[in-house]
Image: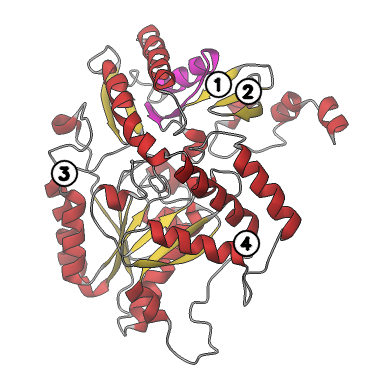
Amino acid sequence: MNDRTNTFDCEQTLANGTYWMPFTANRRVRANPAGRIIASAAGPYYHTQDGHALFDTLSGLWCTPLGHAHPGIVEALKRQAETLDYCTAFQMTNPVTVRLAERIANLAPDGLNHVFFANSGSESVDTALKIALGYHRLRDAGGRFRMIGRERGYHGVGFGGMSVGGIVPNRRMFATAMLNGVDHLRHTHDPAHMAFSKGQPTWGMERAEDLERLVALHDASTIAAVIVEPVQGSTGVLVPPVGYLERLRQICTRHGILLIFDEVITGFGRLGENFAAQRFNVKPDMITFAKAVTNGVVPMGGVIVTDAIYETFMTGPENAIEFAHGYTYSGHPLAAAVGHAVLDAMEQDSLIARVRSLEPVLEDAIHTLDGRPGVADVRNIGLTAAIDLVPAPDAPGARGTALFEQGLKHGLLLRCTGDTVSFGPPFISTPQQLRDMVGTVRQIIDTLA
C-alpha cells in the first residue's frame, strides 16, 4: 500500500475529477489542486502534501476539539479493533457501546437519560424527527405531523434535515423532495441591533414570538416538534439573544410541542459546558449530537431523549420492536471505544474548563477586528466566533474565497462560507495560538480591504 501511495499522483487524479469532493467548488479545485491535499495532522495542525503546516481554525468541521493523532484515541482504536471490531446492533449489543450511552446520559441535563446511536449529525436529526412523530402517534396525537425549523438553520443533508433546515443553497436543488408540513421561524440575527456583540445579544428575545404566529397559523394540534441549533453554527455562529431559548421552551411546553436542540456542533464542550442546554439553562426534550463525541476519528451521532419520550415507546407486546429505526453501524464498537477515549481526555485534562478559560482570549482577539475596513460584523460565544466581511460589489462570496485562499498561504485552514468566516479552534489550543490565528486573519483582511 505504501508503494502505491508513493507512486500515486494525487494532484493529477484530483484534477481529473475522479474524486467528487463534497460541499466544494470542484472546478476551482481541479484547476489548481496544489496545496489542497492534506498528508498528515498532529495536535492543532494539518500538514499538506507539499510540507506546509496549517492551523486548524475550525477543529476539522467542528469535530476535532482534542486535535489530531491524540495518543489515547489511537490506542483505544487499536485495542478495540483487536477485541471486537464490529457488532450487530440489532437484537445484540456490547459493553463498550452500552457504557458509552450511560456516560453520555450522565453528561446531559437531568431527565434526558436515554441514548439512541446513529452515525452522523444528519442521521441524528432524521432520527429525532422520527422519534417526534412516533411519540405523538403513540399518544393518540397522530395529527401532530408538522415540523418547525428556523431560517439559516443547518440540520444536515438528509431529506428530513434539509426540510427543517433553512440554508437556501442546500435546499434549492432538492425542493421537490422536501417533507410536507414544514415551516420555519425567522432567524435571530439582525446586525442593525446586535453587530459586534460579545456573547449573547441583548436584543432579539421577541423573535421567539414567531413561534406563536406559526401556532396560530397551523394550530398547535398539528405541530410535532420545533428543532433549533442553540447557536447556529454552520451559517456563521448566530448567537441566541438573551431570553430567546427560554421563551421557545415556554411556548413549546404550553402547546405540547417537543423542543429539539441540535447540538451536533455545540455538544461536548464547545460552549464551556457539556451541552449548550446547560450553558443557557434550557432543557429540551431531545438533544442530537455527533462530531466531537469521537473527535472526528470514527463517525458517530445520536439522540438523547427524556424519560417521558422513552417510556412512551416502551409499550405494546413485549416481543415487539418499539421503534422501527436504526442503522447497520448504530453504536459501532470502534466509535464507542473512541468516544470513551474522548470523554476520558476531556475529564483528565479538564478541557471544558479550558474552554471557559480560552473564551475571553478568543473574544478579546476577535473583537480587535471591530470596525476595521471590510468587516461588517464580529460575534462570539464559547470557543467559537465569526466574522462577516463586507461583500464585494456584484460578487458575493468573492472576498470569503480570497480570504480562504490567502489563509492557506499564511498557515491557516479557514472555514469560509460566502463572506462569513467561522472559528471553532481545538480545545487544546494555547492562548498565543488563538491570538496568532486572529492576527494573521486581521493582516489578510487588511490586505484584501
Query: Where on the picture, by quarter, is residue 95?
Result: bottom right
Q: Is residue 421 magenta?
A: yes
Q: Earlier in the sequence, mark 1 or mark 3?
A: 1
Quadrant holding the N terminus: top right
Q: Earlier in the sequence, mark 2 or mark 1?
A: 2
Residue 202 shown left or right of residue 416 in the figure: left
Pick out the residue farthest to the top: 447
Pick out the residue farthest to the right: 3
Image location (x, y in percent) of residue 179: 41, 63
Image location (x, y in percent) of residue 208: 17, 52
Residue 410 shown left or right of residue 350 in the figure: right
Question: What residue type is disc 1 on?
Answer: Leu
- Residue 97's place in the image compared with 33, above or below, is below
Question: What residue type is disc 4 on?
Answer: Tyr
**Label 3: how many residues lie within 10 Å, few (<14), some (14-19) or many (20+)?**
some
Image location (x, y in percent) of residue 238: 29, 38
Residue 191 shown left or right of residue 70 in the figure: left
Determine whether the residue tagged by mark 1 lies in a helix, strand or loop: strand
Magenta span of residues? 398-423
Distance CA(mark 1)–CA(mark 3): 36 Å
Q: What is the number of the mark on residue 242?
A: 3
Q: Are marks 2 and 4 in contact (CB under 8 Å)?
A: no
| Residue sitting at x 58%, y 56% | 336
Circle 2 residue: 47
**Label 1: how many residues lie within 10 Å, few (<14), some (14-19) or many (20+)?**
many
Circle 1 residue: 54
Q: Earlier in the sequence, mark 4 or mark 1?
A: 1
